[in-house]
Image: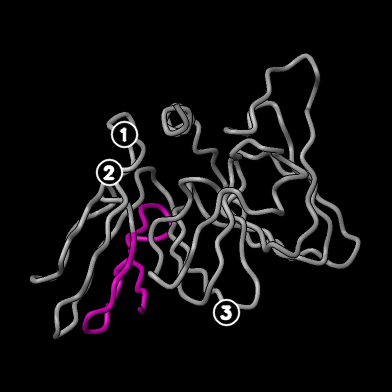
């Protein structure tokens, strides 16, 4: 899959160029348009209350394209996974992913942060391409060995899974939720790489949809 972006960074649209028979996975709500003949196969997940509709788009024998756009104003960012290491991606942060990638919200590396709960990030592994939906623009932060940074979860887009991370409460007097990141912050230690976004998606109603997704 090749990705071409336009209207960035304010109102990013990603055009996914698919080889003959190639498939990509995305939320149906992100669909803008496709070339004629692309097979669209949406499926329900988690019952009728779930706002996401995971969908597989498959190119016809002559190939094709799919245009996708995020719900909130912002950039789109292309992330290439090499199959050697994975990324931890903010829930609802992925706009599209090739069928060769696997998402695991119960990745063992999350146990120290979330325990048995499903948290606000999921682990993605495999070799392939992922397109991330950013609220605002993307900041790429490269941490040197032993370098430390603290990030508010609402502004987190993704981080490499070999980056050391710790979740902690901002204050015991504030409500906290590992499902949304409310009342929490993440400490990271290098070496590693982080992707942050310049606006908080909760401001665009994503916070309510996150809660709805986990009911």
Foreground pick, 35 / 105: 105
Q: Is 10 one of the magenta-colored residues?
A: yes
Direction from residue 162 to residue 39 in the image, left or right: left
Residue, disc 2: 44
Total labels drawn: 3
CA distance for labels 3 and 2: 30 Å
Q: Which residue is mark 3?
A: 82
Residue 115 image point, x, y percent? 71, 38
Quadrant in which the N terminus is drawn: bottom left
Residue 61 on image: x %, y % = 14, 84
Q: Are marks 3 and 2 in contact (CB under 8 Å)?
A: no
Given contact means CB atoms under 8 Å apart, are the residues at marks 2 and 1 in contact?
yes
The quarter holding residue 85 reads: bottom right
Residue identified by numbered label 1:
47
Q: Are marks 1 and 3 in contact (CB under 8 Å)?
A: no
Q: Please give the range of residues in magenta.
A: 1-25
């Amino acid at each position: 899959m090749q990705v071409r972006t336009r209207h960035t960074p304010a109102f990013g649209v990603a055009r996914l160029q698919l080889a003959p028979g190639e498939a990509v996975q995305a939320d149906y709500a992100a669909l803008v348009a496709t070339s004629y003949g692309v097979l669209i196969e949406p499926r329900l997940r988690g019952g009728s209350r779930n706002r996401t509709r995971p969908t597989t788009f498959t190119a016809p024998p002559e190939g094709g394209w799919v245009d996708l756009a995020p719900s909130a104003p912002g950039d789109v960012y292309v992330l290439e996974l090499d199959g050697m290491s994975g990324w931890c991606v903010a829930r609802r942060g992925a706009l599209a992913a090739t069928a060769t990638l696997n998402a695991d919200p119960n990745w063992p590396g999350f146990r120290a942060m979330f325990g048995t709960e499903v948290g606000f990030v999921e682990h993605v592994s495999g070799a392939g391409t992922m397109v991330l939906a950013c609220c605002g623009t993307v900041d790429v932060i490269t941490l040197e060995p032993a370098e430390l940074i603290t990030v508010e979860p609402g502004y987190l887009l993704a981080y490499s899974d070999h980056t050391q991370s710790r979740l902690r409460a901002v204050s015991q007097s504030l409500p906290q939720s590992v499902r949304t990141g409310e009342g929490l912050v993440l400490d990271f230690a290098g070496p590693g790489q982080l992707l942050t976004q310049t606006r908080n998606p909760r401001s665009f109603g994503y916070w309510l949809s996150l809660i709805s997704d986990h009911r």
